Image (cartoon, rainbow, N blue to C red):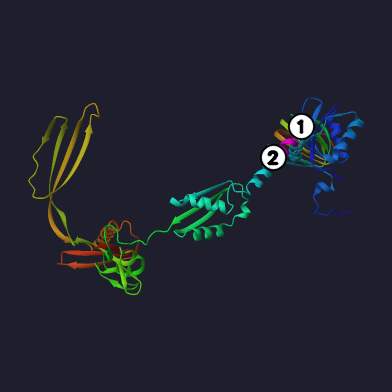
Amino acid sequence: MRINQLVPPEIVKDVPRLTLTGRGEVVIQGHTGLISYETDRIRARCGVGVISIAGEKLTIDYFGAEDMLIRGRVDDIQISGEGR
Amino acid sequence: MKKEGRVQVTLSGLSMERLMNELSRRGVKMDRVKRGKHREITAVVSRGDESVLREIAGEKGYQVSKAKPVGLLRALRRLLDRWGLLAGAVLGIGLVIWGMGFVWAVRVENAGPYEGEVRAYLQELGIRPGTPRSAVSLDRLSDRLEWRFPRIKWARAGWEGVRLLVHLDEGTPPPGREGEQGSGDVVAAEDGVILRITTFAGTPQAKPGDLVRAGQVLIKGEEKRGNDKTEPVLAQGEIIARVWVSARVRMEAKETVSWPTGEEAVIRTIALPFYRWQAGEKPDYAAYDLERTVLPVGGCWVPCALIRDRYAEASLREEPRKAEELRREGAQAACLALKQALITDEIVDKWINFSMIEGDSILVTATAEVHRDIGRRLTK
């Protein structure tokens, strides 16, 4: 099957996309579920592993089936483990 | 029917993350999710999703609080809870609008001795506090007042909010009747060319475009009454004319310049507040240039200064000034003099003339054209 080069890879290969704006906003597109939500750490599952966002006063401004928007003070972003 | 608006709910139970995943899988979108206590989150969802949320939460064993409207819906809900306030505000506004459709007061201005009669006449016409505004025609009222009171020259009716204002001006005899000063003409105070002439009393003797001289009668202090009779009056009017004003400045075409001869002497002096000691005598040059240097020593606690005077003998001679510089300075001086003479007038046009007089000076004349009233009354 030939992959259309114009289509964003995260749609074809089902990989997540993280967008960090400054230190106050993170958008995660393509998550597969929330693992834990605390005000100092949010962990979500995705195609490549587990995304862990650490910080202070973290809130989920939007939570959808595949996307979420996190706001607060972001101190650390880690991706660990294998895919889902 | 799709429900509009958004509501805030509080969810509590074990593993809130699992509930959030399930809700998102079932298509419920959540905003402003905040972690409250350990097993509690608050979230904002649409009213349409609220029922789905409650159903899922009920299935999984989670508690959901009563929904609170957010945004505009919340404000609206609060307003509807206080329906009495809303009704009162609407009623109050309605009463004010209805009340503004009536005359609340009548004010008569500048009527002098006619005020009582005017008020009585207004009552006759049915215009009083409580009369609907729609029953009052301002133009017609003004006309009727002028007709009813012949000595009133001008009547104006208008609204000041909910108050009817009637302003009157009594007819006055034509200005210029022979008064305390007697009859009089308006004459020209200076030469000029008339631009426009407005006569308030008297008979004009000039017209626009005429060249007039100072003292010339512009408005004669008499008016015709009937076919043959003339009546003396105090002439009044405004006569705007083109007037030319000049200012002259004389500038010397030569200046005295000193040239050093080469001879010089230096005198040093120590100066104290009450005593001076000078080393050397001042030279007796006929003309000299002096350069003085003062060096304070000792600061403010010891007021002592060292003064160094350098006398350079100079010979003086007259030299002609540069023409360009002379003209420029002369023009500036003449313009300044002109400006001071025309403080309140607006200059329409301006030009400068230069002329040499007697070989050693130049005369600079700045001339400006202004438009101003040149009429002056001359009483007989």
Q: Nearer the viewer, mark 1 or mark 2?
A: 2
User: Is B107 positioned to the left or the right of B207 in the image?
Assistant: right
For label 2, the crowd category at 10 Å Cα-Cα, with few meaning under 14, some 14 to 19 and many 20 or more, is few
Quadrant of the rendering where the C terminus of chain B is positioned:
bottom left
Kindly identify which chain the residue marked by label 1 belongs to: B
Q: Is residue B95 above or below residue B306?
A: below
For label 1, the crowd category at 10 Å Cα-Cα, with few meaning under 14, some 14 to 19 and many 20 or more, is many
Kindly identify which chain the residue marked by label 2 belongs to: B
Q: Can you tell which quarter of the image residue A27 is in?
A: top right
The kind of residue tagged 2 is Ala
Q: Secondary structure at mark 2?
A: helix
Write down the residue under mark 1.
Answer: B34
Whether the magenta-drawn stretch holds residue B144 is answered as: no
The image shows residue B298 at horizontal and vertical percentages of: 23, 29
Write down the residue under mark 2.
Answer: B89
Instruction: Name which residue lies at 9% across and 42% down.
Output: B282
Q: Can you tell which quarter of the image residue B63 is in?
A: top right
Q: Is the C-beta separation of discs 1 and 2 under 8 Å?
A: no
Q: Residue furthest left?
A: B284
Whether the magenta-drawn stretch holds residue B85 is answered as: yes
Query: Which is more N-terminal, label 2 or label 1?
Result: 1
Depth order, front residue of B263/B63: B63
Magenta part of the protein: which range?
B82-90
The image shows residue B201 at horizontal and vertical percentages of: 34, 65
- Mark seen at residue B285: none
Depth order, front residue of B72/B162: B162
Q: Residue furthest top?
A: B38
Depth order, front residue of B88/B259: B88
The reply to whether residue B288 is in sight is: yes
Q: Main secondary structure of the magenta part?
A: helix
